[in-house]
Amino acid sequence: MITKLSVSHFAILLSSLLTLSACSTTQNNDDGWQNLLSPAEQKNWTAKINHHPSGQNFANTFRFSEDILLVRYDGYDDFNEQFGHLFYEAELTNFHLKFEYRFTGDFLESAPRYARLNSGVMFASQSADSILTDQNWPVSVEMQLLAEREAGVARPTGNMCSPGTEIYYQGDIYPEHCLNSSSPTFPAGEWVRGELIVKDGHVTQLINNDVVLEYDLALAKKDDLVTGENPATWEQMKNLKSGYIAFQSEGQPIDFKNVYLKIL
């Protein structure tokens, strides 16, 4: 016979089990990995698209289909430099990000030509809310993602680009905007695995389980790439010890899935 006391204990136990179950769904069991595209997490992303205020997802550029993030341009008449970024809510310092991506669909012809089969993951970035309406790119570092455009012509992926930032490569400030990785070239339409590890300012980028590039974060520095920003941003982001991650939209449809984050 179940007494009132035992029923109460049973209710508490059941509540605890349900809570643990919910946590495990987000955290992917007990290994510390958090599924950033789970239904519970999808509300924790904020779009910032150039010429639009933070939080306005113009033309439904970023959309979710179950646990897949789709970047699309079917609602665009003209690209009009509407570079977009979808930001995750948490500010990160030491972390490991895993994801898979594939380029798909037709390139928006009014977008810049360099953006064809080109996207990226921004990190060490300013927040979505700190980006002004007509600021083109966030001050950030980018893990650049590319696919083959011309048969037989190498086009590695998992590269580094640095809008408004500086990095150290092999002990020195790297003087160029982008730094190629050692990855092979992948065709459009193929799912590719990417990983980004940031630990105490050291960055390791992997493609399909292979380390393809390593470097160190340095500082934010005014350049001719980022425009329309708040001048105070440069002082606020003088060092790149922490920041936000974001997925990019530049005119090329792309899908992301299996996006997992672990805090280190």
Image (cartoon, rainbow, N blue to C red):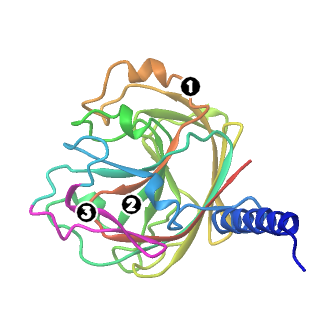
Q: Quadrant of residue 187?
A: bottom left
Can residue 157 be seen by looking at this rendering? yes
Of residue 212 and residue 247, the one placed in the foreground of this image is 247
| Residue 127 sits inside the magenta stretch | no
| Residue 74 sits inside the magenta stretch | yes
Query: Is 12 placed above or below 134 here?
Result: below
Tag 2 secondary structure: strand
**Going from the N terminus, do you reach mark 1 or mark 3 first?**
3
Q: What amino acid does circle 1 point to?
A: Asn
Q: Quadrant of residue 75?
A: bottom left
Q: Which residue is denoted by mark 2 in the rendering?
A: 119
Q: What amino acid does circle 3 point to?
A: Asn
Q: Residue furthest left?
A: 77
Q: What amino acid does circle 2 point to?
A: Ser
Looking at the image, is mark 1 or mark 3 nearer the viewer? 3
Label 2 neighbour load within 10 Å: few <14, some 14-19, many 20+: many
From the viewer's perspective, is 168 left or right of 190?
right
Question: Residue 170: x and y, percent?
Answer: 66, 40
The circle on residue 60 is 3
- What residue range appears in magenta? 58-77
Look at the image and tell me in which quarter the N terminus lies: bottom right
Q: Which residue is denoted by mark 1 in the rendering?
A: 239
Q: Are marks 1 and 3 in contact (CB under 8 Å)?
A: no
